[in-house]
């Protein structure tokens, strides 16, 4: 699925990892892979050595790397990495006014979104590591300890289970759970808290991202009800996954259940996002996204309900699309776990 014959301009970041495995820093000095020419333009200081199948062209401080790239552009239009810096694209536009530049995601939406079997296996392994982390965090003490402290344990566990990079460890307790972007703070967890846990990172280069909501002690009837609505929405969205269904349909199914239960205004984000060499990438399961699901796509399904000043609930699994439907890569129990 590597489109080496396509007209692409690849800058450091996940696209360059995808095509070459190289991870040079993204800096003000231009590094750019030009396809289909198979030329890698690099600052001499960052020369990677010989690369099979690629011609490496190094430039020195004082040279004009944009003029150098412009001379190598033979196609009328190129899609450029989403993560390319604006300063590089604008300079390139000036150096090559005859070339049209398009957004990678807008014009090549399937480039990295459809995973190979090997990639799905790596994502499954990352998910299994996140699942093992969740199973272990259930037995730690929550009551009387801060969010920061629990988050540090999540981070340690992810690394023990093979993550080389931890991207986020959200521990959003009690009223903090009503903010989907709450990270962590010094709030001390106490009896009666709903706690949204959301954590992930990279294992062997591929992403994990899972959320579970737990409760310190026994939940109230209302808490359990809200939890069950989110759980039902997550399950229904999962069951709607099959090839050909539009991304926005998965969002619509999850949202419909939460709306029907009267909590529509409290589900304040999209239902999911793709995952691969990064923890958040296309496709997005969001209203207006008409991209049909394709076997090999991998994304989160993570509906939530957020009640301001009170609590939040989110349940998130990574799911892959198969010929016959969805397959969950996260497999830990969805029930409301009671922690001590
Ligand atoms: Zn409670
Ligand atoms: Zn998450
Ligand atoms: Zn997510």
Image: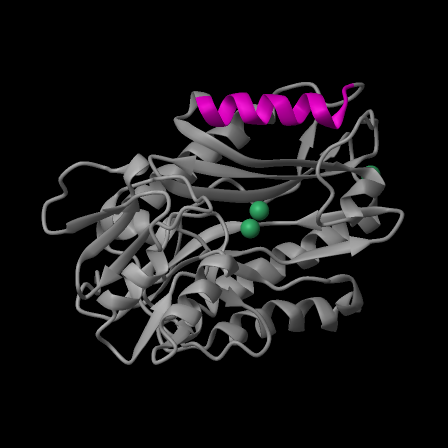
Q: How is the image coloured?
A: one colour
Q: In this rendered view, identify the residue nearer to me: 231 or 93.
A: 93
User: Can residue 296 be seen at all in this image of the molecule?
Assistant: no
Position of residue 138 in the picture relative to residue 238 (left or right): right
Determine the residue located farthest toward the right in the rendered image.
Answer: 309
Q: Tell whether position 152 is magenta.
A: yes
Q: Position of residue 231 (x, y in %)?
A: 62, 54
Q: Position of residue 214 (x, y in %)?
A: 68, 37
Quadrant where the N terminus sits is: bottom left
Q: Quadrant of residue 183?
A: top right
User: Can residue 206 be seen at all in this image of the molecule?
Assistant: yes
Q: In this rendered view, identify the residue nearer to me: 147 or 193.
A: 147
Q: Please tell me which residue is depicted at 80% across the width and 35% down the height of the picture.
A: 193
Position of residue 193 in the picture relative to residue 118 (left or right): right
Q: Please tell me which residue is depicted at 36% across the width and 45% down the height of the picture.
A: 123
Q: How many marks?
A: 0
Q: Tell whether position 199 is magenta.
A: no
Q: Please tell me which residue is depicted at 78% across the width and 34% down the height of the picture.
A: 218
Quadrant where the C terminus sits is: top right
- Please tell me whether residue 148 is drawn above or below residue 184 in the rendered image: above
- Please tell me whether residue 75 is drawn above or below residue 13 in the rendered image: below
Q: Position of residue 77 (x, y in %)?
A: 32, 78
Magenta span: predominant SS is helix
Q: Please tell me which residue is depicted at 25% across the width and 38% down the height of the picture.
A: 47
What are the residue bounds of the magenta stretch? 145-159
Determine the residue located farthest toward the front in the rendered image.
Answer: 62
Q: Quadrant of residue 241?
A: bottom left
Q: Position of residue 168 (x, y in %)?
A: 58, 37
- Please tell me whether residue 209 is drawn above or below residue 169 in the rendered image: below
């Amino acid at each position: 699925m590597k489109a080496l014959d396509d007209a692409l301009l690849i800058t450091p970041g996940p696209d360059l990892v995808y095509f070459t495995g190289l991870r040079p820093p993204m800096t003000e000095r231009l590094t750019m892979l030009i396809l289909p020419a198979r030329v890698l333009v690099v600052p001499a200081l960052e020369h990677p050595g010989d690369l099979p199948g690629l011609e490496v062209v190094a430039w020195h401080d004082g040279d004009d790397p944009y003029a150098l790239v412009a001379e190598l552009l033979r196609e009328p239009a190129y899609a450029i990495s989403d993560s390319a810096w604006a300063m590089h694209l604008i300079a390139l536009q000036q150096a090559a006014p005859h070339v049209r530049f398009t957004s990678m995601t807008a014009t090549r939406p399937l480039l990295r979104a459809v995973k190979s079997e090997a990639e799905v296996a790596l994502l499954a392994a990352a998910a299994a590591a996140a699942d093992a982390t969740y199973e272990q965090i259930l037995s730690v003490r929550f009551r009387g300890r801060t969010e920061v402290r629990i988050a540090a344990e999540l981070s340690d566990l992810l690394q023990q289970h093979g993550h080389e990079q931890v991207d986020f460890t959200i521990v959003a307790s009690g009223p903090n759970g009503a903010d989907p972007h709450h990270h962590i703070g010094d709030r001390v967890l106490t009896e009666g808290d709903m706690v949204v846990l959301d954590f992930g990172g990279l294992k062997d280069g591929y992403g994990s991202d899972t959320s579970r909501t737990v409760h310190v002690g026994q939940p109230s009837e209302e808490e359990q009800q809200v939890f069950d609505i989110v759980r039902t929405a997550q399950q229904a969205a999962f069951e709607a996954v099959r090839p050909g269904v539009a991304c926005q349909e998965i969002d619509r199914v999850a949202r419909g259940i939460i709306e029907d239960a009267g909590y529509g205004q409290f589900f304040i984000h999209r239902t999911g996002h793709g995952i691969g060499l990064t923890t958040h990438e296309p496709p997005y399961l969001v209203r207006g996204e008409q991209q049909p699901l394709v076997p090999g796509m991998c994304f989160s399904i993570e509906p939530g309900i957020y009640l301001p000043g009170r609590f939040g609930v989110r349940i998130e699994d990574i799911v892959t699309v198969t010929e016959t439907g969805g397959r969950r890569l996260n497999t830990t129990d969805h029930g409301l776990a009671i922690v001590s």
